[in-house]
Amino acid sequence: MTQDKKAQQFGVTPQSVDFNEWYNEVVRKADLADHSPVAGAMVMKPYGSAIWERIQRWLDDEFKATGHESLVFPTLIPMSFITKEADHVEGFAPELFTVNKIGTEVLAEPYVMRPTSETIIGHMWSQWLNSYRDLPFLHYQWGSVFRAELRTKPFLRTSEFYWHEGHTAHADEAEARAEVMAMLNLYHRFCRDVLALPVVRGEKSASERFAGAVATYSIEGMMRDGKALQSGTSHYLGQNFSRAFDVKFQTREQREEYAHTTSWAISSRIIGALIMTHGDDKGLMLPPEIAPHQVVIIPVFRKDNVDQMIAEAEALAGELRAQGVRVKVDKRDGVTNGFKYNDWELKGVPVRMELGPRDLESGVVVVKNRTGDEKETLPRHEAISGMAARLSGIQQFLYDRARAFMQEHTVTVDTYEDFKAAIDAGKWVRAFHCGDADSERQIKEDTKATIRNVPMDGDLFGEAEEGVCVHTGKPSAYGKRVIFGRQY
Amino acid sequence: MTQDKKAQQFGVTPQSVDFNEWYNEVVRKADLADHSPVAGAMVMKPYGSAIWERIQRWLDDEFKATGHESLVFPTLIPMSFITKEADHVEGFAPELFTVNKIGTEVLAEPYVMRPTSETIIGHMWSQWLNSYRDLPFLHYQWGSVFRAELRTKPFLRTSEFYWHEGHTAHADEAEARAEVMAMLNLYHRFCRDVLALPVVRGEKSASERFAGAVATYSIEGMMRDGKALQSGTSHYLGQNFSRAFDVKFQTREQREEYAHTTSWAISSRIIGALIMTHGDDKGLMLPPEIAPHQVVIIPVFRKDNVDQMIAEAEALAGELRAQGVRVKVDKRDGVTNGFKYNDWELKGVPVRMELGPRDLESGVVVVKNRTGDEKETLPRHEAISGMAARLSGIQQFLYDRARAFMQEHTVTVDTYEDFKAAIDAGKWVRAFHCGDADSERQIKEDTKATIRNVPMDGDLFGEAEEGVCVHTGKPSAYGKRVIFGRQY
């Protein structure tokens, strides 16, 4: 490829021109993922995989710290399991991948590739559970699941996607419900502190519940086009699955009782939220906590000093690494500095350092944050000692900016006219709703907007308030306004 | 369950009575894995999963430290890909899981669940590779693969198993072959230093090669019944897959050339090797480097001191953890100390500490190594300060014992009579072989033994030597004796 052609590869369609196209180009050009030859499935490339691994590592440490244990279930599930919980099969049947042959043997009962694992886990739990002393089961697994999708989009909607699924069983409802909220809150903290994503915690309306759940809670983020992205869910399943799979135990009082179960998940679509919450027309913008490289150092080469400048850049990198900073040195020769700047901006590395021969003589380095336009020339020791504060400043800036954006793009309305206008303008709407499923369906037909969730007490948008439904005029069902929006 | 029944659950069939049954009982009773409702697939339970996670973590760090990058490919592969490399399809066709339906749509071309990913990775590489500047590709992924198995056994042979698969592409043969050996050596080091498994490195004979490879290298361990377990493989694939998938690049000299590729893997069957190399009639015996818990502390309860003794045990655990030791405190009430001792011996925890009220008063603790019979009463500070050395002593002991066992159970023979007798006695055999595939097949029919590998120069069993084939009397093909054995 010529230099000119290479330079072109960084150009991305501006968000304001075509947000969808901007997203696709960023995913491809920043080397996050590629299309695969399997319908609807993606290949996560090394840079995307490095981000996903950091997400997994952080969450996994937290799961373990809160007493959860990992295990590994088969990818396949007997078809008969899926049909045991009535709502569950209704929800998932149209999306199933069916295995009908192993080797040369055509199967009497086919298997499905798991769309989620409540059923097979319930089956095993029924064998492992005897007494209240065995509870709680606090289990989770990392893996992928399979759901047919008509229109796919890397990270956001793929026929195979990557996640953890948490599954817990408890002796009573109170403990199970506490687990559901604890995991929702863990997800909220993860989004805020690691991904710099402001999200709204709340309960889903009945028509948006997980297939088979008694209650579903979600965290919802706002993308820069004003659409919502459901970024994690936590379900209270009551005794629905334990009845279907006979997950029962002897209580302290020697009675037989079905366990109360939960499930919860965050998937690889959270990377889509990361891209669409922070990115700009130059590409990705990664929060330092999750960035595979927090700092990239670009040594400035002349013809005769390549090896020396690489050694100097590595020395600088070593000093930063000693402080726990993740640093990449860009050693590529034969491409211009401008090429490298564009490349790392596209990849969203939070801080760039340039180190030239004259900088070396004067004991300075040039520092530029991905979030700003200004280049600073700083004494080397100051650039190093100030790096931790600089990175946490960028982290905070990204969170604050996204939160302000969410607030600015959310409007409170009381008439259906205003409601439709606000949704068409790409906003979230705070409005009263009567709780009627037919009304929700009608609103979705009219506007493509759905209830994202009923925000939690004490959270942003969660104030208690009484009023009448913006659509039917009936009394509000939730004791507060709910969030409506279009969604990914 | 009554106390008596619980006690029974620890008893395992002695190895000398029925090694196979011993293995199955250890897997089940130590909570490593369970059978699943999916034919031939297991469920890895939390204790087994914790061991597998530690294996993954160590290897993953090494892969990254040696410049490899992870990525994530789909679980499915178009059927047409599998048939592109002639040897490959011949090897894998009888074992494939076929997906014929997605949702309600019957597929014109079915997918297979990956038995290994050379084909789909080759397909993507052909799109990513342009110039020699892009090489090498140093890729790997963690995941599971699917191969139909008639007779399955947890960890050793399951229809779905867990692994990493490394895949690399290089500009020339020398670099690719160097990668193949580097990964084989990494596996050797991992087995030696982490799992305390002595293994023999060497090349496979032509008839035991991976389907589609130019050369296959393996590490082979010896189980306590004298059988071999292939514990890892590293393949030089030449240009076979790059020709089949058009993985070509422009050389520095502007010529077009096919890449030289490699692949390599260690799977969850290595946990089978861990069980069968170190275990005894009490159960598992885990090397400290891989053990999820290196030390278990058993506080000795009277009726009135449960909370106090738990607090004291936690304090002791804290002091050990401060030194980087992984410690579990067994807080269970309502089971006897003997029950706990048996439980943790079954689970193979390297060191047990008992802490009773009188020990507390005298400032001592009771310490027992899983590898010995002796209980030591030690001053508390001495037990703590000596723990690191104790653990590395156990690690070394396990390795040395297994290596001595391997040497004692390997015999050098020059006649086919001696060969058959030694194999029947459960030994490995060092013998000359002519390299003829028909002869290998005949030996396998006669004795169930195969060539495990041709040991590397400079390694145990790898001495250069000339002679005539133990089976055909023709000249030796390998310049040394090869290892024959029955295998898992």
Image: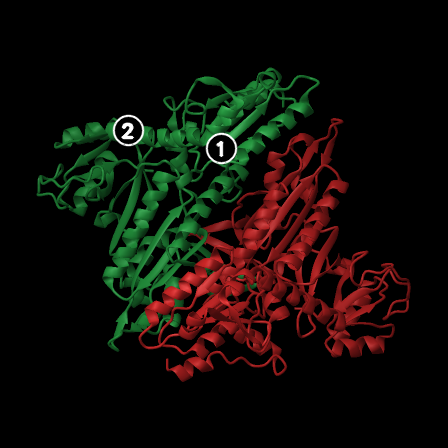
Chain colours: A red, B green
Residue B199 visible in the snapshot: yes
In percent of width and height, residue A484 lies at 77, 68
Who's the residue at 38% across and 47% down the image? B266
- B19 horizontally vs B461: left or right: right
Residue linked to disc 1: B294
Residue B146 visible in the snapshot: no
The quadrant holding residue B85 is bottom left
Residue type beneath disc 1: Gln
- B396 horizontally vs A93: left or right: left
Neighbor class of circle 1 (other Cα within 10 Å; few <14, some 14-19, many 20+) is: many
In percent of width and height, residue B170 lies at 30, 64
Residue linked to disc 2: B404
Residue type beneath disc 2: Ala
The reply to whether callout 2 and callout 1 are in contact (CB within 8 Å) is no
Q: Are marks 2 and 1 on the same chain?
A: yes
The quadrant holding residue A465 is bottom right
Query: From the viewer's perspective, is residue B318 above or below residue B101?
Result: above
- Element type at marker 2? helix
Query: From the viewer's perspective, is residue A108 above or below residue A371?
Result: above
Instruction: Chain letter for mark 1, please.
Output: B
In percent of width and height, residue A312 lies at 39, 65
Q: Nearer the viewer, residue B204 or A301?
A: A301
- A422 horizontally vs A323: left or right: right
Q: Nearer the viewer, mark 2 or mark 1?
A: 1
Q: Quadrant of the N terminus of chain B?
A: top right
In percent of width and height, residue B323 lies at 51, 36
Q: Quadrant of the C terminus of chain B?
A: top left
Query: From the viewer's perspective, is residue A288 above or below residue B209?
Result: below
Instruction: Chain letter for mark 2, please.
Output: B
